Amino acid sequence: MNWVLLSLLLMAGEADSSPVDFDTQIEPLLTRYGCNAGSCHGAAAGRGGFSLSLYGSVPERDYEAIVQQLEGRRVNLSRPDESLLFLKATESIPHGGGPRFDIDGEAASLMLQWIRQGAIRADGQPVPGSESSEKKLASLRIVPERIRLESPGESLRLKALATFADGESRDVTAWSVLAADDSSSLDVTPEGLVTAKRPGRHLLAVRYLDQLLPVEVLLPFPPLQSDSIDSLAPSDRLDNSGVIDREIGLRLRELQLPASPDAAPAEFLRRTSLRLTGRLPTEELIEQFLSMRETVANQNAVDENPLPLEARQKLVDDLLASSAFDNFWTFQFVKLLKVRAQPQSDESARAAFGWLRKQIVNDRPLDEFARELITATGDTRQNGATTFYLAAGDARKQAEFASELFLGVRLRCANCHDHPLDHWTQDDYHGLAAIFAPVRRGASITVGSSGSVVHPRTGGPAVPKLPGDRFLRDGEDGIASFADWVTSRDNAWFDRAIVNRVWKLLMGRGLVEPVDDLRASNAPTHPRLLDELAAEFARGGRKLKPLIRTICLSRTFARSSVPVRRDLQDEQFYSHALTVDLEPEVLVDAISEVTGVASGFPTEASSNGRAVGLIARNVESETLDVLGRCPVDAECSLGGASAEPLPRALLLINGRFLNDQLAAPSGSLSRLLGDKTSNRELITTYYRRALTREPTNRELAFWESQLNVATDERQRRAIAEDFLWALLTCQEFVTCR
């Protein structure tokens, strides 16, 4: 150790007599240098016999661990420079975590100053038995709140400014944790110098004590060449088209991203039908829509607009009023609520399915929907709302499920310690679990007079608590209070969670991803849009159909899926419609619709013989599993699906399901071939059924040339099956775009 340097540090510290506060200066120091991170002493079990609360969330416990445990050896008041806390952090003696800060740095000086002053918790409170600090963080502010840079490599310095309850304000940048969401896109120094390395929108999380704020960093994409500037026109006309188009348009202009023009009528029709009903447009609907579009365009003399608003309104309203809409959205809520058939019986699943469909048919306000779920009791075979309590096996799982379902929040991250990336605490997690502790699950759902869960920090029963709000009073009905709180008009979490899920199903991506992870450090791509849509949803009575209608009638929803700038992969800003895989159930049904062969689900498992009509998530189907059906116990976003690429590809290339559909004697292909349908008509018919459009001249010529080589009916059948297989496995068919 450099003893001369240490003596200088000690003398410098003596010159500074201002008291060092443990809660607001030493705790941030430990957080800033990673001492209380989850990978170090902030882990649930600590590290090396030394345990701290994660990110300093429980300062009184940390103070005790540092000052009073280990017989006070971690802090040496008579010889501050021999304190284990100091020696380990500077690696003056061996330390498994390596040096955390330099011996001649500001952090070392501050720590020594605190120990030299008596290692008190707060001014005037000597060791031992210190009480809570009077100095509390009141607010944190970042300046600037939002950063816009103009070119790669350009930098800007931000500051973190803390205001405390006693009125003091302080620059705490040096003691804050600054973390970029993507270090390959954004550089940030401990001093707050931010540099963007590539264009786009990037997030920087700033943490000081228990507050965490996101900072948005924008770097526009390179401008288009002057001869292509007209492609910016679609976003230029968006300001008067409602909150969706206004906010999307503003973001596109900020990033200099040109918007794609309106989708072709066939593309819009197929997209809207799939996303509202989970079904391909029928040939009758195709004729009606195209005819209506032409009539409206001619009447209004807007031939330059391929999608007049009146035509889009009529289509959307007709689909919203259809039984296909009711079936599809019932299916979505079956997934969301994890409806499953119980062992030896599917009666509870059938009751849940019927109850859910009734809510969708009546467009029941979703706060009423939620309240009935939360307060549901009784026979699970008769009261379908009790499915909420069948989705989780115990109080803690119920708390996790409820927070994700109703708030879009992963409260489970606060089980072992306070949430590392948000304001949720262990008290919130275990307090909500305590609310559900009296619930008794079985053939009937009942609520007992008692029940508890153990709080891991105290070792005693957790006190029932509304997350982020208040502890419940003795004797207060916890479930009724939770239902009131969730559905309160003041609870913006509820509205934001619903809007975000519905937006994902309709647009292909949530404004926040994942959709059940709304938190400060995972800011929406369009914050004002999410807030305003949530407020509009609440003002409109929290009904599903008006929200869907608003989104589907925006210009943003109606855009072409072909980007103007093909060199840029915009997957966040909606400059063009996103291309997403069809959900497994929708894909199976779509194949059946085109081939005219039923998918084979028995009536006891499906309300209508279709995959989208399945009454429970655990109906056996190898085909759906390989295609990426959401697992029974997993959280399923509305519209969410995932699959292993290779098994999915092999199933589509040579799987039994598709082969059986193509070869079925009762299928549409057999009928068309038996009716001596011409090759041209055969090709055109299947293009319309599968892709909702006519084949291009090149496509038509290619497939005619293939079919024309057939010398007999057997050969023609084989080539026709190859043609139909190619259609049903092409990207345009297996995706919604």
Image (cartoon, grey):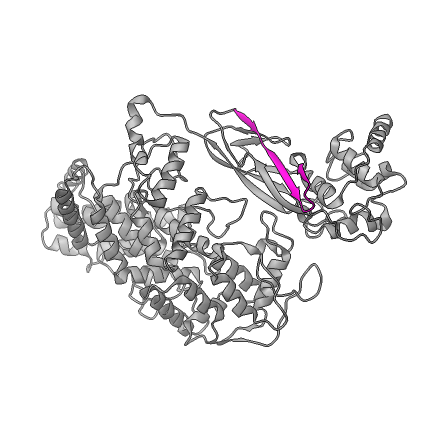
Q: Is residue 521 left or right of residue 509?
A: right
* Residue 349, above or below 699: below
* Residue 205, above or below 686: above
| Residue at x 29% of width, y 65% of height | 609
| Residue 157 placement: quadrant | top right
* Residue 207, above or below 410: above
Question: Where does the C terminus fall, quadrant-wise?
Answer: top left
Q: Is residue 78 visible?
A: yes
Residue in front for this viewpoint, 696 or 397: 397
Q: Residue furthest right?
A: 78
Q: Is residue 282 magenta?
A: no
Q: Residue furthest front?
A: 167
| Residue 222 placement: quadrant | top left
Q: Is residue 155 magenta?
A: yes
Q: Where are the magenta residues, as a range?
A: 154-170
Image coords of residue 550 (percent x, y): 32, 51
Q: Is residue 27 left or right of residue 301?
A: right
| Residue at x 61% of width, y 30% of height | 189
Image coords of residue 511 (percent x, y): 43, 46
Image coords of residue 568 (percent x, y): 38, 32
